[in-house]
Image (cartoon, grey):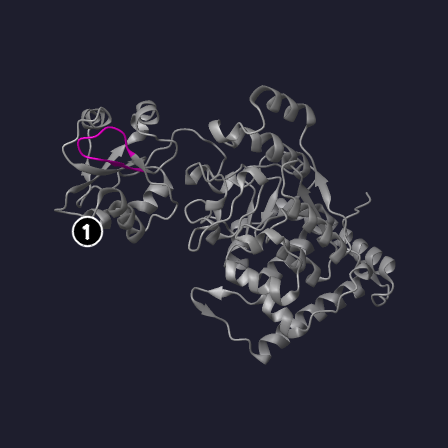
């Protein structure tokens, strides 16, 4: 099989990164403490990369010439990678991937990337969206191993995204494997519902046709893939992102559950760390980042964000937080087996404290406008992990507003979902709603930030000083 996207070193015309620059790529935070950039650390990283290159040369038994001989070097590295893959992939199903994830969790993105490429060779691909995940390509380049890059061209991307695709191909001397949606499916959707149906009935259908289905086809040619997911991109929907996992949502080339491995080398990195790396290494990036865009997707569904907003608030901004996954990484939101069936919980939420419990009759009175007090209510499901994560902050909000003109309450809406959807604005759990005293209608909390200070500020803005 001819892999056109294996990098070509001679086409780069770039200076090999210095040991200090390489260390910047490998360093990462642990909590709020950064590892010191000591000469010893630099030496360790440099020695590791030299050893890796030496191992590959020894394995090939062919001398690798310098960057002027690109074809020979590429062929040698590709052959070595294929031999390594044929050995390693045979034991993939025997690996304890949770254990591997635990062992790699303290490693740098560079080391995680090297593990991925060493394990799967040319049977793994880097998913590149044209945003800051360009850092993944730089890390792959630093390993010195062959690598593949693929992108989903939805037909609705920004011009700046297409431009950065071209820059990246020229910068690294690669050919990105572009994947496109089925033309018939797109045509039928647009002719039936128009070009912007996602603004009224949600983005899931459009994303399924333009992104998820093409991705599914691409992944069926691979045994593993590499993504730029990070835990800090959207707390609540991406906090459960291990550095490597058995993909819970997609299948690989052999088919069936467990047939695809997913690496997330940037999982533990912060946005600041990724951008420091991009700047230091001189990596090409999307020009939209200079205009306030952080998370970049299709043009109609992406906008710039304001200071202190979460990255994913610029995506599908008209929808609730949990809906802000297009389906590519939904496995980190749903159950581990990919199911969407009704779930149960060991206990209810807000059992003790100052959060009042609303009965079904009270909720119907509130929906009808019969309100004796300003009320902030959370529509929740006790099995929902995001509701569980909200529990301490919402309880603290209730304590701080205790005795004020605003009542803080809860309603278990999963037991009354049809009514809650129609009359209370419920789309996803949790949904926080303000019901003003003596009036009809409600105000829905719009943000993914659910800490007590932000919630209290919002209550004051809609209900006055409590």
Give the camera-side residue of 228 and 189. 189
Lateral position of residue 345 relative to residue 169, left or right: left
Horizontal and vertical percent for residue 116? 64, 54
Horizontal and vertical percent for residue 114? 65, 59
Which residue, given by chain and number where applicable, does mark 1 sit on? Answer: 400
Q: Is residue 342 magenta?
A: no
Q: Is residue 269 visible?
A: no
Helix, strand or loop status at disc 1: helix
Identity of the residue drawn at 55% across and 58% down: 104
Identity of the residue drawn at 19% across and 29% down: 359
Residue range of the region highlighted in magenta in the rendering: 432-442
Lateral position of residue 50 relative to residue 241, left or right: right
Q: Disc count in the image?
A: 1
Horizontal and vertical percent for residue 113? 63, 57
Give the camera-side residue of 433 and 117. 433
Q: Local crowd at mark 1 within 10 Å, few (<14), some, or many (≥20)?
A: some
Q: Is residue 439 magenta?
A: yes
Give the camera-side residue of 437 and 132. 437
Lateral position of residue 230 relative to residue 372, left or right: right
- Quarter of the image where the N terminus is located: top right
Identity of the residue drawn at 64% across and 54% down: 134
Q: Residue 47: which quarter of the image?
A: bottom right
Lateral position of residue 406 relative to residue 385, left or right: left
Q: Residue 376: which quarter of the image?
A: top left
């Amino acid at each position: 099989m001819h892999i056109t996207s294996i990098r070509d070193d001679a086409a780069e015309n770039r200076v090999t990164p210095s040991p200090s620059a390489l260390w910047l790529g490998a360093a990462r935070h642990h909590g709020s403490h950064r590892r010191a950039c000591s000469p010893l650390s630099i030496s360790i990283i440099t020695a590791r990369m030299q050893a890796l290159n030496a191992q590959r040369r020894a394995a090939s038994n062919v001398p690798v010439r310098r960057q002027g001989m690109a074809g020979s070097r590429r062929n040698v590295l590709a052959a070595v990678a294929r031999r390594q893959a044929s050995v390693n992939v045979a034991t993939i199903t025997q690996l304890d991937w949770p254990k591997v994830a635990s062992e790699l969790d303290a490693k740098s993105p560079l080391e995680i990337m090297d593990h991925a490429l060493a394990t799967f060779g040319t049977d793994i691909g880097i998913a590149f969206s044209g945003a800051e995940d360009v850092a993944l390509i730089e890390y792959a380049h630093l390993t010195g191993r062959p690598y593949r890059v693929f992108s989903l061209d939805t037909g609705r991307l920004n011009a700046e995204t297409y431009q950065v695709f071209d820059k990246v191909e020229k910068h690294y001397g690669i050919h990105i494997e572009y994947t496109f949606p089925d033309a018939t499916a797109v045509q039928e959707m647009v002719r039936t519902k128009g070009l912007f149906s996602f603004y009224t009935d949600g983005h899931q259908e459009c994303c399924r046709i333009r992104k998820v289905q093409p991705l599914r086809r691409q992944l069926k040619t691979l045994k593993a893939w590499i993504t730029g997911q990070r835990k800090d991109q959207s707390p609540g929907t991406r906090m459960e992102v291990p550095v490597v996992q058995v993909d819970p949502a997609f299948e690989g080339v052999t088919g069936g559950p467990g047939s695809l491995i997913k690496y997330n080398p940037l999982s533990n990195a912060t946005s600041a760390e990724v951008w420091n790396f991009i700047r230091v290494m001189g990596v090409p990036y999307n020009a939209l980042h200079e205009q306030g865009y952080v998370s970049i997707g299709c043009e109609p569904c992406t906008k710039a964000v304001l200071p202190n907003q979460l990255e994913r608030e610029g995506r599908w901004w008209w929808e609730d937080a949990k809906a802000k996954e297009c389906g590519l990484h939904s496995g980190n939101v749903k159950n581990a087996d990919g199911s969407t069936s009704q779930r149960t919980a060991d206990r209810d939420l807000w059992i003790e404290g100052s959060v009042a419990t609303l009965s079904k009759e009270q909720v119907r009175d509130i929906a009808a406008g019969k309100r004796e007090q300003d009320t902030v209510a959370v529509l929740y499901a006790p099995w929902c992990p995001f509701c569980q994560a909200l529990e301490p902050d919402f309880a603290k909000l209730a304590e701080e507003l205790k005795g004020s003109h605003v009542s803080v309450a809860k309603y278990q809406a999963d037991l009354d979902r049809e009514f809650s959807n129609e009359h209370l604005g419920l789309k996803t759990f949790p949904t926080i709603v303000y019901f003003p005293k003596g009036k009809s209608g409600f105000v829905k909390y719009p943000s993914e930030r659910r800490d007590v200070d932000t919630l209290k500020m919002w209550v004051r803005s809609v209900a006055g000083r409590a």
